Amino acid sequence: MERMRIKQAEELIKKACVKQKKTMIKEPEEGIINVKLFENAIKELIRAEEYIYKSLPYHRLSKKDASGFCQHILKAREKIDKILADFKVLEMEDLEDKIRELSLNTLIITTKSDVKKALIKRGIEAPQIIVTGAPLSIEDMKKINPKIPEKTLENIKKKIEHTKDNIERKIKKMNIKRVIVLAEPNPTSKLIGERAKKLYNAKIILDKNPKEITYNKLIKILSK
């Protein structure tokens, strides 16, 4: 059964590689297969395949399911394009360079270290990312936990002030023109986003899995 599913996924990969109008397809050159990328592309397509069975018998997807389906396809396509670029079949624009260029004078606030790692991997410079697990005000902290002990609140207050000082220092020192909050859609992230919008006119992007954000989606966010 698993072998059959992998075979189906391989067929989907072939279809995903169909020549597009403005894509320059060249003869393959000698190269090395990035097996991990290939395996990850297959996994994404297998995840996408679940929507085919889920949507039987008409294969019509709701907006929410369409979003999930297309995210898996886009992630697979991203990996497939990189494999084809390794064999010089595709001439790919360096997406990391593009992200680096688009993110100039931008500060990104997030809530988890693994999101920071993912953003750095995609081309954002480390100094342009701030990670905070706490809201940006004591009032917001009390909204999350009204029964929080006063002693604990004092320690959190110091962390909040340190985070805000760090943000403001970077805004001045790095000539930041734009602040973006990129985090998961939970109560803490929403409060961080709302407070950052008031304090720094931040743009709020709440994504259910920001550490898996695609290059193209990040480019779209940074282009607005």
Image: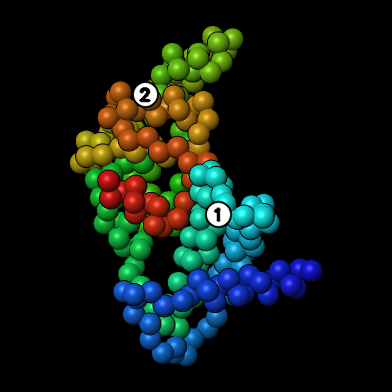
Residue 219 to residue 80: above or below: above
Foreground tag (2 vs 1): 1
**Left or right for 60, reference 195:** right
> Which residue appears farthest toward the right when viewing the image?
1
**Left or right for 57, reference 188:** right
Q: Is residue 40 visible?
A: no
Few, some or many residues within 10 Å of mark 2 (<14, 14–19, 20+): some
Q: Secondary structure at mark 2?
A: helix
The residue positioned 51% from the left and 25% from the top of the image is 187
Residue 76 to residue 34: above or below: above
On residue 146, the disc is: none
- Find residue 5 and report its image quarter: bottom right
Q: CA distance from mark 2 to mark 1?
A: 33 Å
Give x and y (percent) for residue 4. Answer: 74, 72
Q: Quarter holding the N terminus? A: bottom right
Q: Nearer the viewer, residue 171 or 24?
A: 24
The residue positioned 46% from the left and 33% from the top of the image is 132
Label 1 sits on residue:
69
Give x and y (percent) for residue 79. Answer: 50, 67
The residue positioned 56% from the left and 72% from the top of the image is 13
Label 2 sits on residue:
195
Number of marks in the image?
A: 2
- Mark nearer the N terminus (2 vs 1): 1
Q: Amino acid at mark 1?
A: Phe
Q: Nearer the viewer, residue 107 or 16?
A: 16
Residue 175 to residue 140: above or below: below
Q: Secondary structure at mark 1?
A: helix
Few, some or many residues within 10 Å of mark 1 (<14, 14–19, 20+): many
The residue positioned 34% from the left and 47% from the top of the image is 221
